[in-house]
Amino acid sequence: DSIETATGDGKSLYGGTVPLETTVSGSTYQLKDPTRGGTYTGDAANRTDLCVLAVCLNRAPATVFTDADNHWGTGTTAERSTAAVDAQYGTDVTWDYYEDVHGRRGIAGDGKGSFNRVHYGKGYNNAFWDDSCFCMTYGDGDGTQLGPLVSLDVAGHEMTHGVTSKTAALTYSGESGGLNEATSDIFGTLVEFHAGNASDPGDYLIGEKIVRPGFGRSALRYMDKPSKDGSSVDCWSATTAALDVHYSSGVGNHFAYLLAEGSGPKTVNGVSYNSPTCDGSSVTGIGRAKLGKIWYRALTVYMTSSTNYAGARTATLNAAKDLYGAGSVEYGAVAAAWKAVKVG
Ligand code: ASN
Ligand code: ZN
Ligand code: CA
């Protein structure tokens, strides 16, 4: 029996009306995409665990969303399927970024899809990738600090943890942990740019769509000047390794911003940035596409589980040499951007 694919659409929370590839099942449609490895989105029903007889696992069920007419969601949280539209679309654009730009089909690169569960727990202020279920989990947020965590950059960030796990497998502590987090912020941002969605255009902010007034600032993290979040560091130092991985990532995020866009004031898609270097130097950017090529090759060919910032410098220089040559402008820009964040 063949799986029938249908093209529908959905009214999302953050991305306007988006196309969705779905599966025909009898007289209903399932939010499951046969063109992207069978990726589907299910409802965790505000639960966090799955209990069978007396045994409970930290694994909420995810009942696949269904719809009668293949027009999903309403654009507001009043309808449970709306967050599912965003989650499914986030998986789609993440899949497409890795396939279109890096020739990688799926998180593991084997053509297999992953799955999403939305409405996990009650007022849950996080989202996470889980290697053991090969799945994404999204909270609804508490509504005060955060709204539903289903934005494109968060989707790209979390699923990139799966890519990192299947490639360099950067250990999630110390400097390698900061690099693991920076890798997720870098590709989450490149996913957001690649999607080209007019309602959620690319920027160098992480989580700008999910923060609420009670959070007290405009985004979770800022790549042009990571210290704007009050905790992340802009420049490498001997104490970087001791920080939480979401703060030591600042060094890698700052490097990535400088490599793509350069130092000094700049406006991209209507958002203004000003990235100061740590040593007073000026850096000329080489663009987002080359940042993505260099970081992906470094991650998949040169980095290992114990790579630290000095090792990331070597890995990205090797990647730039392979891609553009040792005497290239790109190789020089990689060196300049690391120097500007006090690595090497
Ligand atoms: N949202 C967090 C992150 O991806 C959750 C986690 O897995 N640490 O960094
Ligand atoms: Zn993360
Ligand atoms: Ca963003």
Image (cartoon, grey):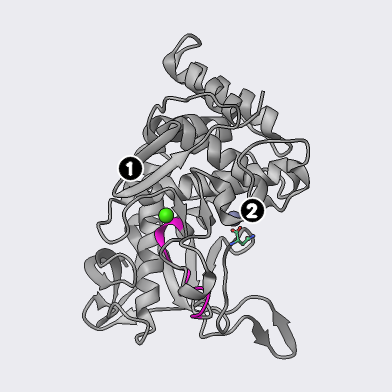
What is the three-letter code of the residue carrying label 1? Thr
Report if residue 65 lies within the magenta region: no
Ligand 3 neighbours mark 1 (CB distance < 8 Å)? no
Residue 303 visible in the shown view:
yes
Q: CA distance from mark 2 to mark 1?
A: 25 Å
Q: How many marks?
A: 2
Q: Residue at x 51, y 35 (%)?
A: 276
Q: Classify mark 2 as within 8 Å of ligand 1 or not, answering yes or no.
A: yes
Residue at x 51% of width, y 16% of height: 321
Q: Which mark is residue 267?
A: 1
Going by the picture, which residue comes out furthest to the top? 327
Above or below: residue 213 compared with residue 194: below
Assess disc 1: are there few (<14), some (14-19) or many (≥20) residues with their C-alpha within 10 Å of its C-alpha.
few
Q: Position of residue 325 (x, y in %)?
A: 46, 12
Q: Look at the magenta stretch and give its main secondary structure.
A: loop
Expressed as whole percent of the image width and height from the top left, the position of residue 153 reads 44, 56
Question: Mark 2 is on which residue type?
Answer: His
**Range shown magenta:** 143-153
Q: Quadrant of residue 76?
A: bottom left
Residue position marked by numbered label 2 in the rendering: 246
The residue that appears at 27% across and 56% down in the rendered structure is 197
- The picture places residue 324, in percent across and down from the top left corner, at 43, 17
